[in-house]
């Protein structure tokens, strides 16, 4: 497919390529000449100055302002250390006047120097010197305490000193212009943040000095947090806002935790009210901050409103806890959390309403998690009756579910919590996007309420059975076409399983509950969309009912298996009438599992096992009659074969033909029917498996049999198979029968051949072998033609 251009076009192409090659050669020669010249040593030029390469410029590893700041910081630190050393160590060498003169002069100098430095534009130096001056004021306060007030209360003096220092530092910063313009151009950055940091201590130290209790100290923490919050929200200086915000979060968090601990450990209503007031104060601080930040920072406002809502719930919910039993602690907090949803209909900003909604949802989620242990015990506790079947019904529903596990403490009010949250989901969630999920959650919570209610209230045992039965019916009824069906079906199945285990306490309860569940799910299977789950569940409970009936009648397991087989029969008949594959397959699978259970019940009794296997084979054969279930015929055949083998083993049959002939005869019949319908089918496919099943095991048995009867019968059967194959020109019977016939004959002649070989001289076998080789070689061509003829004859056979 290569395109060859015309001669003229090809000549033009060749000329173009030759010109390109010449041009390329010229360029390469010029480059070569330049390289040769460059590699030759250059002649020295007497008067030409030699150019020296310029040294690369070194990049500084730091900037000048960075070096300046480090030097100033180190200088300020060293001066501060020197001042401390002078005050603490060298103080005693001077008199009172000298001490006051030295400290006063140094402090005034350190505080006044920044004014001159700022005027000269040395701001960094001014910051460093101002820091030294602030440190000297602390030393002045300490010196005053050591000289004038050595016996006064240290905490009280520290409270007054910290307040005084905060005021002095703030006045100093304001005097230098900290609030007259941007802090980066006129004022100092250090005094005002330092004043805010010092302001964190006065209230706390004052409360400690006064010997106040935990409520007062907590109030001091929250008061400081409120002061910090006001500074962070109102002052324009960024450094002050940062320090105030850190103080607000630190003091507010510490105070909120302390208030929560006071509420939890309150010993009476008055203590609970005081703790609630502190928690509400913390919540008010959060709400105030959220109200001022909802426009510039809505996410921060939402978080603050969330924290305020949780603190409100903790405060109000802790008041009734001190006077009510512990069972009502969680419900009380839950009611307060639900009450927060009333704010959603007010005119509060959207970030605040969102935060309160999250707070309410968090409280409800925590309350639901608190009920999970009780729900788990109510659902899984009845499983313990599997080890005490029909040992007697307990008195109450709680005794029925706590047979192996204890009932969670303070869980009496769990049904109230679950039902309240379910009602909130139904009433509060109205949006079309979340409405289906809310209804599903409400359904699950209502189901959990019904499940845990009898045990929580310690109702009678039969009431617990009735409630779980009605819950199963209600869950199935909720599987409406207009709603998602999977959650109600799952809840119905879980409830029914728990009910079945709960009924194992007595014989009558077990039979009644299993029969009712089988009928209930059978009726539910008629509803559209429920058959794929309800029909298999009905069959499963029918299987359990059959086992329970057998145990009630005192039947051994092998006899109960006959009763269990009613379920596979019903499943097969039901599947034949169904047209929906999504229902047919689960029904057939459930019937197959019931059949396997029946087989397992009869393993210890071989005669009954053979009967059950044959009955299962009948069921499978009946299913294989359907056009879309032809493949089950193989399973039916296998079951019949297994039944025959188990029966033969029960009779003590040891002959292999007893096991293989029941397989061979049906296999040959099936092969004959297939070849009649499809004449092109190979004899190996139709008759090969059936013949191999009998001939091969019999051949092995004949080679190990010392009697003459088995080899004679095997040889006769092989001869008959060979003749039938030759008569009908079938390849498989001819080859298999002939092979078995030859091997059987060799087995019979082997002793005599051994005797003949022993009687002949030793030179006879080599001589005979040589004669055979000569004869074969002499007629080689004829034998090849004969072999070809045999191959053609076999090839014409089916």
Image (cartoon, helix red, strand yellow):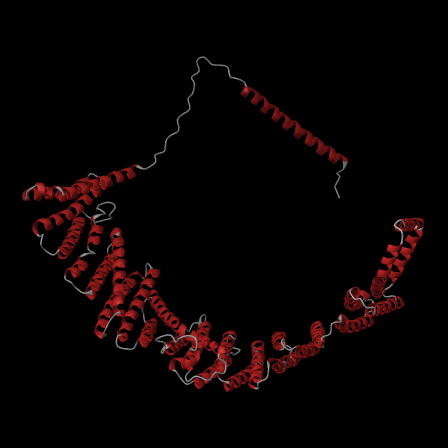
Quadrant of res 327: bottom left
**Left or right position of 786 against 287:** right
Using the image, determine if residue 470 lies above or below residue 3. Answer: below
Does residue 177 sit above or below 11 in this rendering? below
* Vertical arrangement, residue 784 with respect to residue 581, above or below: above
Between residues 781 and 489, which one lies in front from this camera angle?
781
Left or right: residue 466 versus residue 537 is left
Q: Position of residue 210 (x, y in %)?
A: 14, 62
Q: Quadrant of the C terminus?
A: bottom right
Q: Is residue 315 left or right of residue 138?
A: right
| Residue at the (27%, 69%) spot, across then down | 264
Residue 526 visible within the image: no
The residue shown at (88%, 50%) is 762
Residue 627 percent across, percent down from the top left: 71, 75
User: Furthest residue to the top?
Assistant: 46
Quick one: 637 or 741, which is closer to the camera?
741
Question: How many numbered marks, from 0 up?
Answer: 0
State the residue at coordinates (88%, 62%): 796
Q: Position of residue 287 (x, y in %)?
A: 28, 65
Image: 447 above or below 251: below
């Amino acid at each position: 497919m290569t395109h060859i251009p015309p001669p003229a076009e090809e000549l033009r192409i060749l000329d173009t390529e030759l010109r390109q090659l010449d041009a390329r050669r010229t360029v390469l020669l010029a480059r070569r000449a330049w390289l040769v010249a460059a590699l030759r040593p250059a002649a020295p030029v007497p008067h030409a100055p030699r150019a020296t390469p310029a040294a690369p410029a070194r990049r500084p590893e730091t900037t000048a302002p960075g070096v300046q700041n480090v030097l100033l910081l180190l200088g300020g630190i060293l001066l501060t250390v020197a001042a401390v050393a002078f005050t603490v160590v060298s103080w005693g060498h001077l008199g009172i006047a000298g001490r006051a003169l030295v400290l006063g002069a140094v402090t005034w100098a350190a505080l006044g120097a920044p004014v001159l430095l700022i005027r000269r534009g040395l701001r960094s130096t001014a910051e460093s010197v101002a820091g030294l001056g602030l440190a000297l004021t602390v030393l002045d306060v300490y010196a005053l305490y050591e000289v004038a007030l050595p016996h006064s209360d240290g905490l009280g003096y520290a409270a007054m000193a910290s307040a005084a220092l905060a005021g002095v530092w703030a006045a100093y910063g304001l005097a230098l212009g900290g609030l007259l313009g941007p802090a980066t151009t006129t004022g100092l950055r250090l005094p005002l943040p330092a004043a805010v940091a010092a302001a964190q201590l006065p209230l706390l130290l004052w409360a400690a000095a006064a010997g106040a209790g935990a409520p007062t100290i907590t109030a001091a923490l929250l008061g400081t947090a409120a002061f910090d919050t006001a500074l962070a929200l109102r002052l324009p200086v960024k450094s002050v806002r940062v320090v105030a915000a850190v103080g607000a979060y630190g003091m507010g968090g510490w105070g909120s935790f302390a208030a929560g601990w006071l509420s939890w450990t309150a010993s009476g209503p008055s203590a609970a009210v005081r703790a609630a007031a502190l928690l509400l104060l913390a919540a008010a601080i959060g709400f105030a901050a959220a109200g001022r930040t909802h426009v510039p920072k809505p996410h921060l406002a939402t978080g603050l409103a969330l924290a305020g809502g949780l603190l409100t719930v903790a405060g109000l919910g802790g008041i009734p806890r001190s006077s009510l039993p512990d069972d009502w602690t969680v419900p009380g907090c839950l009611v307060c959390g639900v009450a927060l949803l009333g704010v959603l209909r007010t005119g509060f900003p959207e970030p605040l309403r969102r935060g309160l909604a999250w707070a309410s949802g968090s409280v409800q989620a925590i309350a639901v998690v608190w009920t999970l242990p009780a729900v788990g015990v109510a659902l899984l506790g009845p499983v313990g009756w599997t080890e005490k079947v029909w040992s007697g019904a307990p008195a109450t529903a709680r005794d029925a579910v706590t047979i192996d596990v204890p009932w969670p403490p303070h869980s009496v009010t769990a049904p109230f919590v679950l039902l309240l949250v379910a009602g909130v989901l139904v009433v509060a969630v109205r949006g079309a996007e979340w409405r289906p999920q809310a209804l599903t959650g409400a359904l699950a919570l209502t189901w959990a309420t019904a499940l845990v209610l009898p045990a929580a209230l310690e109702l009678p045992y039969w009431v617990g059975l009735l409630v779980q039965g009605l819950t199963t019916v209600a869950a199935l009824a909720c599987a409406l076409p207009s709603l998602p069906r999977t959650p109600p079906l799952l809840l119905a199945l879980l409830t029914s399983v728990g009910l079945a285990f709960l009924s194992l306490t007595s014989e009558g309860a077990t039979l009644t509950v299993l029969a009712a569940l089988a009928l209930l799910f059978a009726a539910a299977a008629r509803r559209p969309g429920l058959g794929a789950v309800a029909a298999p569940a009905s069959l499963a409970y029918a299987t359990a009912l059959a086992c329970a009936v057998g145990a009630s009648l005192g039947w051994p397991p092998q006899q109960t298996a006959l009763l269990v087989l009613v379920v596979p029969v019903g499943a097969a008949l039901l599947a034949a009438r169904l047209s929906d594959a999504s229902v047919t397959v689960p029904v057939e699978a459930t019937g197959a599992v019931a059949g396997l259970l029946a087989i397992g019940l009869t393993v210890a009794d071989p005669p009954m096992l053979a009967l059950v296997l044959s009955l299962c084979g009948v069921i499978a054969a009946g299913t294989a009659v359907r056009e879309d279930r032809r493949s089950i015929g193989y399973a039916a055949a296998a079951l019949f074969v297994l039944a025959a083998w188990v029966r033969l083993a029960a009779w003590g049959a040891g002959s292999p033909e007893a096991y293989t002939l029941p397989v061979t005869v049906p296999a040959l019949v099936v092969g004959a029917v297939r070849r009649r319908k499809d004449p092109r089918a190979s004899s190996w496919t139709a008759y090969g498996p059936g013949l191999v099943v009998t001939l091969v095991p019999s051949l092995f048995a004949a080679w190990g049999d010392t009697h003459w009867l088995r080899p004679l019968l095997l040889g006769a059967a092989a001869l008959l198979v060979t003749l039938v194959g030759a008569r009908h020109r079938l390849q498989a019977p001819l080859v298999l029968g002939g092979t078995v016939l030859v091997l059987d004959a060799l087995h019979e002649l082997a002793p005599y051949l051994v005797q003949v070989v022993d009687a002949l001289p030793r030179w006879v076998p080599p001589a005979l072998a040589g004669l055979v080789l000569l004869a074969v070689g002499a007629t080689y061509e004829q034998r090849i033609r004969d072999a070809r003829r045999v191959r053609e004859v076999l090839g014409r056979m089916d």
